[in-house]
Image: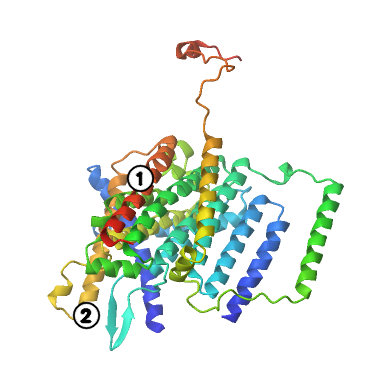
Amino acid sequence: MQYLFYLFAAISVLSALLVVGARNPVNSVISLIVCFLSIAGHYILLNAQFLAMVHIIVYTGAIMVLFLFVIMLLNLNKSTEPSKTLLTRIAAVTAGALFLFTLLGALRQGVHIAAAKEFDGNTGLVKSVGQSLFSDFLLPFEVSSVLFLSAMIGAVMLGRKDRSPREDAPARPEPSERRTKKIPA
Amino acid sequence: MIPTIIFLVTLLLITLGVAAYATYAERKVAAFMQDRIGPDRAGPFGLLQPIADGVKMIMKADFMPASANRWLFFMGPAIAMTTALLTGVVIPWGGTLDLNGTPFSLQIADPDIGILYVFAMVSIGVYGIMLGGWASNNKYALLGAIRAASQMVSYELAMGMSIVALVILTGSLSLNDIVLQQQAGYWNIIYQPLGFLLFLVCAFAECNRAPFDLPECETELVGGYHTEYSSMKLGFYLFAEYVNMFISSAVISTLFFGGYDVPFLQDLGLSQNITVILGTVGFFLKITFFIFFFMWIRWTLPRFRYDQLMNLGWKALIPLSILNVLLTGVGYYLKNGF
């Protein structure tokens, strides 16, 4: 078990570094997929099977497919990558270093984060997850589902073709007129 | 431990064997539907044809386009085949055998979340097609890969919703529990006819089988995502499709047709081991019927157009599946209360 943890941890860290380091966007996305799969492995080691499977279905199976889909469709590669100016690079390095110092400073104090509940083997099983979601965390659960619903409706509204006739829009040519229209050479 | 390993290897061999003979059956069924004879040269009734095909695939030159991404080109068929084979471990292939007093379950793993595991493997399976199609560096292959991705993401939603309705009914995500419940009562097809229909259509789409085989639509895209593939790499892609078909048939039989349950078999008073083995035989008969059904549809229906495919997925199947969840919930409430 311990060796499995080290294996998954090494894969997670290495693939996460590759996500940032890879020049080709497709390689980045693939590293991110590997990273998500190894994190699902960590969940299974903690006996959180439900979380692991939902993580794979949602992140690896749906969101990353869309990422890859967009990158393939746009066919992004090195030549289309926008060149970054020196100023952006310095700003990025400074911001990253500051964040690292903050994290290190916080962790050096050795804050002990107490678990809300004592861990046992049943914590991650579907029954206990469902019970705590629908009893202790009912309000956050419902609120987040309303959030998802509004995001869904928003996406539909944005993607909808505007069918309402507009005053300022030029009248569409009649079908017969369109058919006879000459295509300019 | 050792019986489990033996069972695992047997299961792998059976899966590969069924997939190999499914290719033979496909050609024979096609021949039957079109009033032809079909393959009959290799061995009696052409029974050695899959072996001849396998030898042919391996002996052919393995070509890789010069501008392909070598690593991903290699990974594509490997991912497709691996995810197809991984699903078999959670399917209950039979009841519990009695090996000299020690019980031995004919299911390799029975996790709490069996059906979600199947779903997770299906959702990873699309990467085999997407990465292979992209790595080929070919326009037709890329178009096939993009079609595969959008098709699978669209139909996964309706498939997931049809499973949600089933889970409301069974109250368990474990596949063995679902079978045991059907053994005690009636098969789920009686309670979930709409859910079954939705699941079946989505299973066709997830397997990229006709009428949903747009990713490899040969009239428009040469060979779709596997245009640039040759030799055994192509063989793996084609084989993975048949493995997927076998596993989908097994999942459909498990969820809606009682799995290894054969009606009235328990009442015959046979010994436990014989009952279990007969149940497994019954399960494989159900699977064979569904594999035949897959082929029947393929040689009967023409292929969808791309916009028809998307309209069916988003405007027909998803609303219907949400309605099905709602109806199941109302039915459950009326029968059991809260």
Q: What's the residue at 56%, 64% (across, down)? A: A37
Figure quadrant of the N terminus of chain B: bottom left
Residue flagged by tag 1: what amino acid is it?
Answer: Leu
Position of A114 relative to A35 (above/below): below
Residue A54 shown left or right of residue B53 in the figure: right
Is residue B324 depicted above or below A8 in this figure? above
Identify the residue under disc 2.
B272
Residue B319 percent coordinates (x, y): 39, 43
Colour scheme shown: rainbow
Task: Look at discs 1 and 2 and give the one toward the viewer.
Answer: 1
Residue B70 position, x and y percent, is 61, 55
Please tell me which of labels 1 and 2 falls first in the chain.
2
Q: Position of residue B149 (x, y in %)?
A: 50, 47
Asked whether B213 or B73 is in front, the reply is: B213
Q: Secondary structure at mark 1?
A: helix
Any mark on residue A176, and which?
A: none
- Work out whether residue B316 or residue B108 is closer to the camera in this orientation and state it: B316
Q: Which mark is residue B320?
A: 1
Q: Chain of mark 2?
A: B
**Up-down: is B276 above or below B251?**
below
- Residue B12, by quadrant, is bottom left
